[in-house]
Image (cartoon, grey):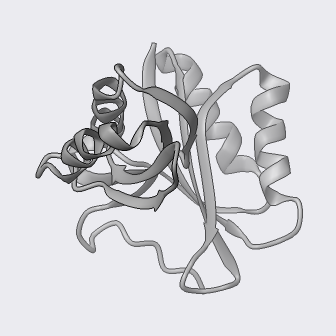
Amino acid sequence: MRRKVLQLLVDNTSGVLSRISGLFSRRGYNIESITAGVTADPRYTRITIVTSGDDEILEQIWKQVAKLEDVRDVKTLEPESSVYRELALIKVKCAPEQRQEIITIADTDNFRAKIIDVCKEALIVELTGNQDKIDTFIGLLDNYEILELARTGIAGLGRGVENVTYLP
């Protein structure tokens, strides 16, 4: 099983995300992560999908997605020529005497996480980075109780200007 990150440019129309996810559902393909947001041109939405399968399945996914009416462009974001980021919000239960330990972990140069909320029994940490960075940070919190965790999924762009898609 391989992972593939697909970047789609689609018409910014009602139901487009439902039609794309429906294609995956009907065919039994897995979506590990999906993010969507309007581009600089409000007529279009950029969707980043992380999926997995063998080479044949991944090729079929690419072809099926490219056939959809609302899809204007499909690219594979290769790790060596792309930038991926994910946002995580992590609510950690901690007593006042434990706060500094968590803040110290968050403040390290490796993570540069932000404490965005503090209350008597917990704090919320905001962290952006690649999936490995976020997974590593969560692993360092093993000694604490994570009350809630929200992850956005991957957003990504290709490096440089060579592969930019210009739509009319």
The residue that appears at 50% across and 44% down in the rendered structure is: 122
Residue in the image at 36% along x and 37% along y: 131
**Split into 4 quadrants, where in the image is the C terminus?**
bottom right
Q: Is residue 53 visible?
A: yes
In the image: residue 8, left or right of residue 125: right
In the image shown, does 150 or 16 lie closer to the viewer? 150
User: Residue furthest toward the left?
Assistant: 109
Residue at 26% x, 49% y is 103
In this rendering, position of residue 17 left or right of residue 84: right
Q: Position of residue 151 (x, y in %)?
A: 53, 44
In this rendering, the answer to whether 111 lies above or below 43 is above
Whether 56 is drawn above or below 44: the answer is: above
Q: Position of residue 11 (x, y in %)?
A: 73, 71
Query: Does 153 sit left or right of 37 as displayed?
Result: left
Residue 89 visible in rendering: no
Q: Residue at x 39, y 72 (%)?
A: 164
Given residues 85 and 119, the one toward you in this image is: 119
